[in-house]
Amino acid sequence: MTYPQPKPIPAWQVWLWPILLVALGIGLWLLPWRDAVPELRLWVEAQGAPAWLAFVAIYVLVVILPLPAAAMSVVGGLVFGWWGFPLSMLGSILGAVPPYWIGRIWLHGPVRRRLGGPRVNAADRALAQRPFVFVTLLRLTPILPFTLQNWLLGLTSVGFWPYVWATLLGLAPGTLGMVWIGELGGLAAARAAPETLAIASAGLILFGGVILWLGRMATEELRRAGLHIGRVR
């Protein structure tokens, strides 16, 4: 039996989030409350570990719920500077674990019995054969929201540790990009030297290009492997 090929994914869907995030980075420069950012950073620094733990806890909730985790990474860069990167990664991993285990323990059997079919079973077998590679590629794609990926992967045969390590690797570039945007906003709020802002902006643009390239390549690799998420046109 043959299955119809998936429809191509319009290019605007792939470019939408990068454009919105660039607009967010510019908006951070223009907001009237940007004068409060240096004071906020000093306050967070004075609080120490409790502020860090509070940010991670909020990040975990955002990841579990259908909320934009990328925005939390931007906030992390704005408030914590480059320390927002490890904090955001920690929040992402801790938030990705509960949906996985809920899917694995309680939802896997009922959902697979109801929705299972030749295509679903074939995709699950492909994931089980190379779980680390496929989960890493999936994390790099801009097609499915991170929270949705967590719930769906709990319904597959992917083991826990490949899930965790592949999530770490696949999330790192995008999370760093979001933190970079926040840090750029923090530099602008602190009225950093124009040369510093120019270097940080140029680096972000170049790194953003790398992220877009990685996402496109990951999408194509998943499609060629038989995971039908479509072709970007």
Image (cartoon, rainbow, N blue to C red):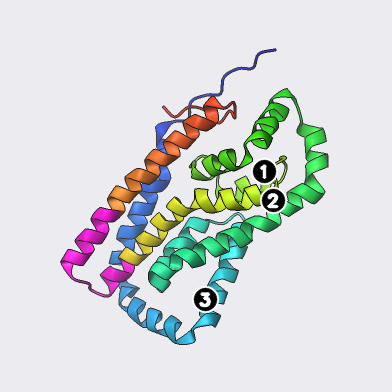
The x, y position of residue 123, in whole percent, is 66, 30
Magenta stretch holds residue 204: no
Say if residue 187 shows up in the picture: yes
Kindly identify the amino acid type of the residue bearing the numbered disc 2: Phe
Quadrant location, the N terminus: top right
Residue segment shown in magenta: 185-203
Amino acid of disc 3: Trp
| Residue 49: mark in rendering | none
Secondary structure type for disc 1 = helix
Please state which of the two labelled residues, at mark 1 or mark 2, is closer to the viewer.
Answer: 2
Check residue 52 in the rendering and tell me which mark sits there, or answer none.
3
Give SS at disc 2: helix
**Mark 1, residue position:** 152
Q: Distance between the residues labelled 1 and 2?
A: 13 Å
Residue 160 disc label: 2
Residue name at image x 67 percent, y 57 percent: 97
Residue 86 horizontal side relative to residue 189, left or right: right
